[in-house]
Image (cartoon, rainbow, N blue to C red):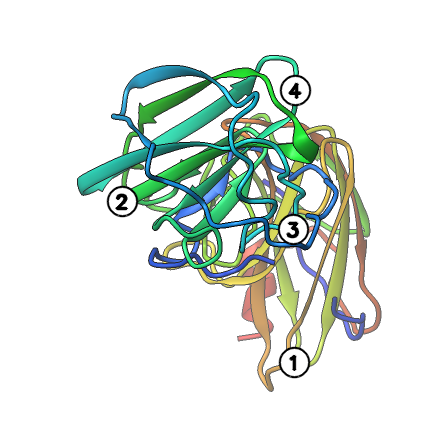
Amino acid sequence: MRKLIVMIIAVSLVATAAIAGLPEGALRSTAKIPPVKDAGAGTKIGALDCSGAIEVTLDNSYIGDNTGAANNVAAYGCSTWNESGGEVVYHLFLSEPTMWEVTLTGDGCDLDLAVLDQCDEDLGCLIVVDSGVVTNTPVSGDFYFVVDGYNGAGCSYTIDFVTGTPPPPPPVVDFCDSVEDVFGTTFTGTTCNGVNNVSALGCEDYTEAGLEYYYEIFMPAGSSFTADVTNTADGALWVVDACADPLNCLAYADGTLTGGLETVSYTNATAADMYVYLVIDSWGTDSCGDYDMVFAATGGAVATEQAAFGAVKAQYR
């Protein structure tokens, strides 16, 4: 790994609705970036009709068609999309907390999938997705899955209900010894020789399951930094407060796709010197890439010789 030690002063700092009846973040779309779609018509047509809901079980696939189905709902309470096509409703009951994934595949038209925890398009709406939804934690109870047509779309489709696997306990994180001393403001590297230590710390928009590279940054009281990173993978950046468990998220960035520029900033607003760690990460299981980083730092005195890192740390402790 590379270790970056800087004395720096000032750089400027840089919706999801709560899920009804479920823990925050319990469900997520299988697509990283939701598509941009037209808003609903704004006029309530009627109430969602679940009287003919099709009972389903996990680990089964169902074929359907919403062509000519009743169009009672034009929009859902947790989405702005125009869902003016016909609706087909499925009902799943889980007596025990269970992980699952549901995937909708339309045959030649644009269908969406609304997930509800009660038969009410407003009060029960959990999430509306373009193609698939997955749980981040085991859930139980009643779920209604409504296949609806975007902008009046209607066609045949397949909907798959699959039991998910609970995530394994997170590995013990300790990358403190994997370092080498480097100095400067521009860096190139790769994450493809790394491992996945940091995936979710509670500040992220997406679970980042890619391989990683790390920089340690010495920050005097009141100092700030900004890191601009372009990655050949779908890059993400973390700033964390330690190199071993427990880690706390100080800043996070994942606003672009593959090859896009990610920017993260952090300011030491305390009255004490501190060390923080910049993690170069990416979205996608075991994904990795080559990256270029520009690190903005100004002011302060810093040792420039290739000193042993322990000796450099000792100057500030």
Is 116 above or below relative to 157?
Answer: below
Q: Earlier in the sequence, mark 3 or mark 4?
A: 3
Disc 1 crowd, CA 10 A, few/some/many (<14, 14-19, 20+)? some
Of marks 2 and 1, the one in the foreground: 2
Q: Where is mark 1, residue-wise?
A: 221
Query: Could you tell which of marks 2 and 4 lies nearer the N-terminus?
Result: 4
Q: Earlier in the sequence, mark 1 or mark 3?
A: 3
Q: Residue at x 30, y 17 (%)?
A: 60
Q: Nearer the viewer, mark 1 or mark 3?
A: 3
Residue at (34, 32) in percent of width and height: 52
Identify the secondary structure beneath mark 4: loop
Along the viewing direction, whichever of 110 and 174 lies nearer the viewer: 110
Q: Secondary structure at mark 2?
A: strand
Provide residue 24's location: percent of width, then percent of height: 41, 58
Mark 4 neighbour density, 10 Å: few (under 14) some (14–19) many (20 or more): some
What is the three-letter code of the residue carrying label 4?
A: Cys
User: What distance separates the C-alpha of mark 2 from that of mark 1?
Assistant: 52 Å
Secondary structure beneath dot 1 equals loop
Report if the CB atoms under discs 2 and 4 are less than 8 Å apart.
Answer: no
Examine the rendered structure and indicate whether residue 303 appears above or below residue 144.
below
Toward which corner of the image does residue 297 lie, by quadrant?
bottom right
The dot on residue 80 is: 3
- Label pair 1/3, CB-CB below 8 angstroms: no
Image quadrant in which the N terminus is located: top right
Q: Which residue is identified by label 4?
A: 109
Q: Residue at x 41, y 36 (%)?
A: 145
Q: Quadrant of residue 92?
A: top left
**Which x, y percent locates residue 152?**
67, 31
Residue 142 circle label: 2
- Marks 1 and 3, how far apart at CA: 45 Å
